[in-house]
Image: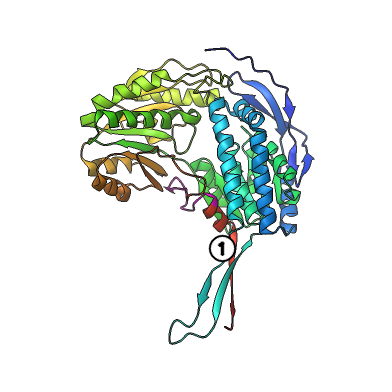
Amino acid sequence: MTKVETTFALRHEPMRIAGKKVDAEEVIEVHYPWNDAVIGTVPAGNAEHARKAFEIAAAYQPKLTRYERQRILLKAAEMLVARKEEISDIITLELGISKQDSLYEVGRAFDVLTLSGQMCIRDDGEIFSCDLTPHGKARKIFTMREPLTAISAITPFNHPLNMVAHKVAPAIATNNCVVLKPTELTPMTALVFADILYEAGLPPEMLSVVTGWPADIGMEMMTNPNFDLITFTGSVPVGKLIAANAHYKRQILELGGNDPLIILNDLSDDDLAKAADLAVAGATKNSGQRCTAVKRILCQESVADRFVPLVLERAKKLRFGDPMDRATDLGTVVHARAAETFERRVHMAAEQGAEILYDPGRRGALLPPIVVDRVPHSSELVMEETFAPIIPIVRAPDDDDALIALSNSTAFGLSSGVCTNDFRRMQKYIAGLKVGTVNIWEVPGYRIEMSPFGGIKDSGNGYKEGVIEAMKSFTNVKTFSLPW
């Protein structure tokens, strides 16, 4: 593979508090996972910075018309695409995913902005006639949606642009003010994104971005009295910490996943080849760092011997290495510590009887695609959320009821994919899998930015993301009636 010499200027990105650039006494270093070089710094903000941002947000009452909100969002989308190479570079430098994957992330954020812009001009009020029963009157009840006081948003490392867009764009579309805290691991993309929105015409009071260590700023993001709703995407422990501390606040918690791709035994060789394509892509895109990535491949025993070689063949074709090389399919995970953890899970599974079919060897944060067959379903590798490009194959019973029970046996309930051509079996799995999404002949993570998305059990508290659902969640419904 061609070696790419990545040159970059060390950049410092201050916080954006109502559009003003604000620093703190200390800084947090942001590292490039490929070589652990420091590529930038952000302020190590504290509770006082978040408190000031929430005070500004709560005191400001946005007056943007629906048309003005649409113009801001669509202009920001155009600006994002115009700067896609720069933004993609920042994502790759702070996260380590390949340029292929970071460019895709920019494209998804464009979709979020565009769809939010389209939806914000749609009047979402309803009308109810009251003369429907013997006790009714000649009146009508009308509904309208109003913005909240402010929104607290906390975003994860694995999608430093798209997860930010999914929280900020629907908030703008509903005339809400947001205080955003991106993770300290990948904070720089969010700060640049804020500048794009300001330049597109967003009143600066409507968006603040604060940075800092969780111990210093996290509790303020959970408990400040000036916000009505907290929206969080991230780990289960942090989500449950928010649930325990946010008290009388609305909470939208999108947490971890342990998503299966289920391969049923009615498939032909051609079908199994298509399923293998889904398995490898679903497990390795974004370096496997998606809550909806394929974390378990549950393949029915009677077709496993035909399926596994197809997976192995595809995994061996993936080009891994320098994330800035455009020929690279698979970059790094977020840091070497994570890579070590997930590599250790592979070795633990092998000690329990799994067969490692392909493992080119870890180098720092670079964890190549690892194919593991005959993985015991009780192993940590597949019972926990393994956030890495590992392709674990569990040989599952040919009995559908037993397979559904096996799939449901983890603490998670986010998404799933099922490969079958039998419509009755499709119905059975759609009904039987305890998850938020069931995709037939697609990876678990397939969605569009508009459609409802979210999980149950330890994968979330049931509230959905996606532009339409977020806009509903980010508003209060007011009813009024008139005498006609």
Magenta segment: does it hold 328? no
Magenta stretch, residue numbers:
453-467
From the image, which quarter does the C terminus lie in?
A: bottom right
- x, y percent for residue 272: 29, 30
Give the vertical position of 26 relative to 209 (above or below).
above
* Res 91 seen here: yes
Mark 1 crowd level (few <14, some 14–19, many ≥20, 10 Å Cα) = few
Q: How many numbered dots are placed on residues in this image? A: 1
Given residues 308 and 227, the one toward you in this image is 308
Q: Is residue 377 left or right of residue 151?
A: left
Asked where in the image residue 160 lies, by quadrant, the reply is top right
Residue on which disc 1 sits:
124
Given residues 82 and 360, the one toward you in this image is 82
* Res 354 seen here: no
- x, y percent for residue 230: 59, 51
Q: Amino acid at mark 1?
A: Asp
Q: Residue furthest top?
A: 2
Residue at left 61%, top 42%? 164
- x, y percent for residue 39: 68, 24
Q: Is residue 240 left or right of residue 298?
A: right
Given residues 135 and 131, the one toward you in this image is 131
Q: Main secondary structure of the magenta part?
A: loop
What colouring style does the render use? Answer: rainbow
Asked where in the image residue 173 lies, by quadrant, the reply is bottom right
Q: Is residue 428 left or right of residue 99?
A: left
Give the vertical position of 290 relative to 208 (above or below).
above
- x, y percent for residue 403: 26, 40
SS under mark 1: loop
Residue at left 33%, top 44%? 408
